[in-house]
Amino acid sequence: MATDRVTVVSADPFIIAVSISPKRYIHKLILRYKEFMVSVPTIEILKDVWLFGLRSGPDKLSEARVTLEKPVAVSVPLIKEAVANLECKVIGMHDYGDHTLFVREVVAFSYNDKVLPDDEPKPGSGFILYIAEDKFTMEESSAVKTR
Amino acid sequence: MATDRVTVVSADPFIIAVSISPKRYIHKLILRYKEFMVSVPTIEILKDVWLFGLRSGPDKLSEARVTLEKPVAVSVPLIKEAVANLECKVIGMHDYGDHTLFVREVVAFSYNDKVLPDDEPKPGSGFILYIAEDKFTMEESSAVKTR
């Protein structure tokens, strides 16, 4: 699935949270396997992000152009074209409103060091920002300093 | 305080989650008052965002240039120059790693309809994207469509 409902919770240990509706097919998979991959896409693979967000169920994988590869610590595949892949295990689940907030520990990760050199994201890499409906944008290529 | 560790959890009811370290002064305030304002800034008030992120305690308010105003449903002030203000009440707290994940229901909100016309954010408005250290960027002014 595709989502922007994800945030970092804790740096050490590295923990993130993602909100997912019980109506989503993936919700059942997470409850069963307790493992998860968070893949950070760029605008270069936007068509697949849209496909993964729009369509439900595993059939969409046959239409996707991205490459699935074996990860290090979990059994869910990573996406080779993503600029970062966070391999996660579920450590908490909390139902709020119409969604479940899944809390996960990142047990392994890998990233593209051209897009994330020196441990920080490089502006102009095409990180995807969701606007609404089928509209997206990306970040500007210049950084603004506060001083 | 300033943070980018915030995400939407549920649309109906409108619920968000924010991760905050117990080392932060605001952590004690939230535990005591169970109320919260989430104000969405733009690059125009970046200097105040940096001040709020860098310095601890209420003294920093005297140096800030933004205008505090009375909200509708909570007792915490809103920021007039922010493009959206979400008035929140805490409905859940979960400790994970070195942070507390606060879950809040948005009980009232207001926004700038030039920046968020027709219920969607307008690209080029200067939403702040955090890179690292004192570096920030914003979104591009053009939208990308998937089709």
Image (cartoon, coloured by chain):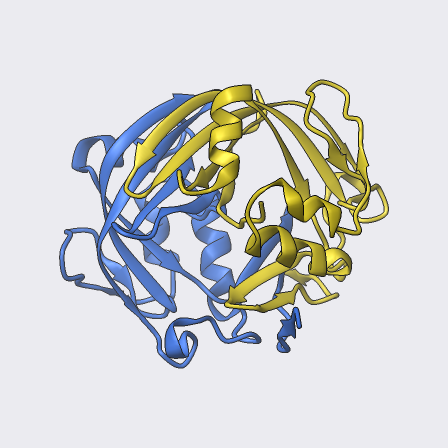
Chain colours: A yellow, B blue
**Residue nearest the viewer, comparing A128 with B50:** A128
Residue A93, image x, y percentages: 40, 25
Q: Quadrant of the C terminus of chain A?
A: bottom right
The image quarter in which residue B120 lies = bottom left
Res A102 visible = yes
Residue B60, image x, y percentages: 37, 50
Residue drawn at x 36%, y 70% as measured from the top left: B81
Res B136 visible = no
B133, above or below A110, in the image = below
Residue drawn at x 17%, y 63% as measured from the top left: B70
Residue A115, image x, y percentages: 80, 49
**Residue nearest the viewer, comparing B67 with B35:** B35
Residue drawn at x 43%, y 76% as measured from the top left: B115
* Residue A42 located left or right of residue B85: right
Residue drawn at x 74%, y 52% as measured from the top left: A63
Q: Residue furthest front?
A: A59
**Residue nearest the viewer, comparing B15 with A142:** B15
Q: Quadrant of the N terminus of chain A?
A: top right
